[in-house]
Image (cartoon, grey):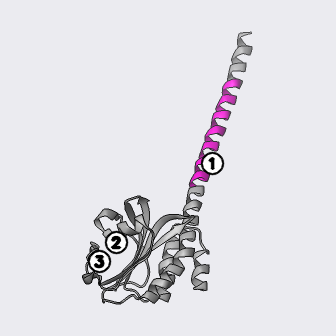
Amino acid sequence: MRKATLALTQDLRLDSVLDTLLQSLRDLVRYESASIFLVEADSRVFLAREFPRRTSTAPVSGHSATLQASDYPLIQGILEKPTSVLVTDTSQDEAWRSFKDHPELRCWLCVPLIAAGRLIGLLSLGHTKPNGVLKEHLRIAELLAIPAAAAIQNARLYERAEIYGEELEKRLTELRHAESALEQAGKTSQLSTKRFN
C-alpha cells in the first residue's frame, strides 16, 4: 500500500495518475474490470479511465462516455451520500443496472474519491463471478482511494495552472507586440512631425 501511495505522487499529469491508480490497485486486488469516473456535475460522471477485462494488462484511455447517474441508482446513491458500495451478486440486487460495456458483471464495488471534503470521482471494480470482489477488496480500495483522490485533485490543479501559465505567456507576448507597435507608431509620428516642421 505504501508503494502504491508513493507511486501516485510521482507524476502530476492526470493521465499518469489515473494509469498508476489502476495499476497499483491491480497489484493489490485481482479484478476483471475497473473504472475511474470523474464527477462532471451533480448527476453526471465521465469515464476517465478503464482497465479492460481479459485482453490487455495495461490501462487504456476511457471512451468518451458520460453516465447519467439517475440511470444507475447505485451511482446516484453514492453521489448523494458518498459512501462505498459492495454488491456481491448483481443478479440479487434490485438497485443494480448493468453498464453498457459490461453487461456480464456479477460482482461490483464502488468507492467515492473525496478530496478537500468534495466528491471528485468514483473508483469501481467488477468481476464476472458472484463474490469475485470481497469486503477485504473494498477495504483496500477505500484505503487507496484517499491518496488517489488527493493525487487526482493535485493533477487537475496542476493542469489548470499549466493552462493559466500558457494563457498568461500568450497575453504577455501580445502585450509586448502591442507595446512594440505603439513604440514604432510613436517613432513614425515623430519623424512625420519633424518633416512637416
Q: For numbered disc 3, what is the local secondary structure?
A: loop
Q: Main secondary structure of the magenta part?
A: helix
Q: Give the residue pinned by disc 2.
A: 74
Residue furthest top in the image: 197
Q: Is residue 162 rendered to the left or right of residue 67? A: right
Percent position (x, y) of residue 52?
37, 80
Front position among marks 1 and 3: 3
In the rendered structure, which amino acid carries the disc numbered 3?
His
Residue found at x 26% / y 76%: 94
Q: For numbered disc 2, what is the local secondary structure?
A: helix
Q: Give the residue pinned by disc 3.
A: 102
Q: Is residue 183 rendered to the left or right of residue 2? A: right
In the rendered structure, which amino acid carries the disc numbered 1?
Glu
Q: Quadrant of the N terminus?
A: bottom right
The residue nearer to you, when weighing 191 against 39, is 39
Q: Give the residue pinned by disc 1.
A: 169
Residue count near mark 1 (Cα–Cα under 10 Å), binned few <14, some 14–19, many ≥20: few
Percent position (x, y) of residue 7?
59, 79
Residue 149 visible, this angle: yes
Q: Which residues are magenta?
A: 163-186
Residue found at x 59% / y 80%: 5
Front position among marks 1 and 2: 2
Q: Are marks 2 and 3 in contact (CB under 8 Å)?
A: no
Q: For numbered disc 1, what is the local secondary structure?
A: helix
